Amino acid sequence: MKEVTIRLSLAENVKAFVNVVSRFDYEMDLQSGRHVVDAKSILGIFSLDLSKPVKLIIHSENCGDLLEAVKPFEV
């Protein structure tokens, strides 16, 4: 499992993020406090507090391609 802290402060960022992560088959979640949602779900992401950075949790060890793709969203 890998974890990356990202920021999705604008609606355009959320849409771009979902477009990026949807291209990958990895299971991944976004966590904000105690709330965890599917990282590929736009509605789920909008239910989080996006005023603060959120944690992207990738349920895979070999996900270098995904980590590279989400670099623009990292804090």
Image (cartoon, rainbow, N blue to C red):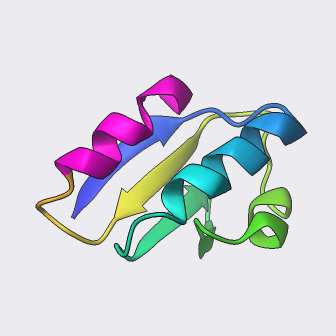
Placement of 55 over or under 75, stated as above or below: below
Q: Which residues are magenta?
A: 64-74
Q: Per the image, is 37 magenta?
A: no
Is the residue 5 above or below the residue 15 in the image? above
The spot of residue 43 in percent (x, y) is: 84, 70
> Residue at (84%, 64%) from the top-left corner?
47
Which quadrant of the view contains residue 19? bottom right
Return the residue nearer the eye: 37 or 22. Answer: 22
Q: How many marks?
A: 0
9 left or right of 53 in image: right
Expressed as whole percent of the image width and height from the top left, the position of residue 39 reads 58, 65
Residue 25 spot, x, y in % from top left = 37, 75
Looking at the image, which residue is at 56% across and 60% down? 30
Locate residue 60: give its quadrant.
bottom left
Q: What is the chief secondary structure element of the magenta stretch?
A: helix
Tell me the quarter of the image containing the N terminus: bottom left
- Residue at image x 49%, y 48%? 55
Query: Residue 67: x percent and y percent?
Result: 31, 43
Q: Is residue 67 located in the magenta-colored stretch of the structure?
A: yes
Q: Is residue 7 left or right of residue 44?
A: left
Identify the residue at horizontal 74%, vertical 36% (top origin).
13
